[in-house]
Amino acid sequence: EADIYQTPRYLVIGTGKKITLECSQTMGHDKMYWYQQDPGMELHLIHYSYGVNSTEKGDLSSESTVSRIRTEHFPLTLESARPSHTSQYLCASSEGTGYQPQHFGDGTRLSIL
Amino acid sequence: AQKITQTQPGMFVQEKEAVTLDCTYDTSDPSYGLFWYKQPSSGEMIFLIYQGSYDQQNATEGRYSLNFQKARKSANLVISASQLGDSAMYFCAMREPQNRDDKIIFGKGTRLHILP
């Protein structure tokens, strides 16, 4: 059973606020990912990391930023939330090598008013 | 060019019937992995089944099986004896470990509706 946790599960917040979405995994995975997904739509990779102090931008441009100071922790931050940031954000992790699948957290549903 | 193609945006199937969800992929890498995920309306992504490019037999996991046709670059998901709880979005995905980026690439998904 995969152990990857996202908090909060739901967040409704006003425009202009700073937001941090938390993601933690206990599997010791080197690789971690953030996806943005609108309801019923495809997943868009916005950030990924191959290990501590490594972060890369994904395929979809995002105003968010990420950090990877510890292997198990990969938080995503929005400095100033806007209504266009309303979406679901999914965090995932995978083994560093091989053909293993990504394991996902339950997601954060973010609504910016 | 899309690397993962799911041609069925939506499907309606009667309960207890078998379902086939289509997935074709594009890669020049001889080594890759193929996956299927289920996403219910609650939003979480649930890993269902995996097929390696060198696997000789089709993968099976309970009611899920993967119809892997390597020459046709197809990896269809088959759900036997469908249940109401199978109603969800289904995503096909591919991982190419030899690719420098080693990202997992997802298709656009198929929404499956199981009818009582």
Image (cartoon, rainbow, N blue to C red):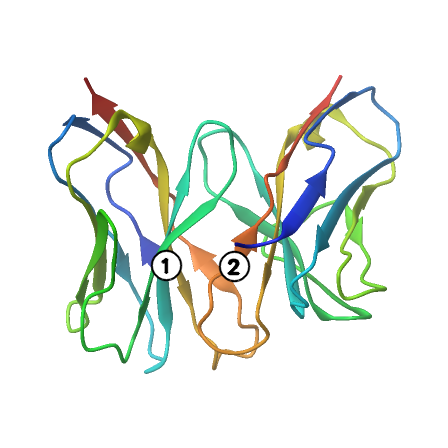
Closer-to-camera residue (B9/A93): A93
Percent across and percent down for residue A63 are: 76, 44
* Camera sees residue B1: no
Percent across and percent down for residue B20 are: 17, 45
Three-letter amino acid code at the position of disc 1? Phe
The disc placed on residue A102 is: 2
- What is the total number of numbered labels drawn onto the structure image? 2
Q: Residue at x 11, y 33 (%)?
A: B17
Q: Residue at x 69, y 59 (%)?
A: A26
Q: Residue B105 lies in what quarter of the image?
A: bottom left
10 Å crowding of disc 1: few (<14), some (14-19), many (20+):
many
Asked if residue A66 lies left or right of residue B10, the reply is right
Query: Could you tell me which chain the residue with mark 2 belongs to?
Result: A
Residue at which label 1 appears? B35
Three-letter amino acid code at the position of disc 2? Gln
Q: Secondary structure at mark 1?
A: strand
In the image, residue B46 sits, relative to residue A8, either above or below, namely below
In the image, residue A96 sits, relative to residue A110, either above or below, namely below
* Camera sees residue A48: yes
In the image, residue A39 sits, relative to residue B95, either above or below, namely above
C-alpha gap between disc 1 and disc 2: 9 Å
Q: Secondary structure at mark 2?
A: loop
Location of the C terminus of chain B (image quadrant): top left
Percent across and percent down for residue A72 are: 75, 61
Closer-to-camera residue (A97/A76): A97
Same subunit: marks 1 and 2: no
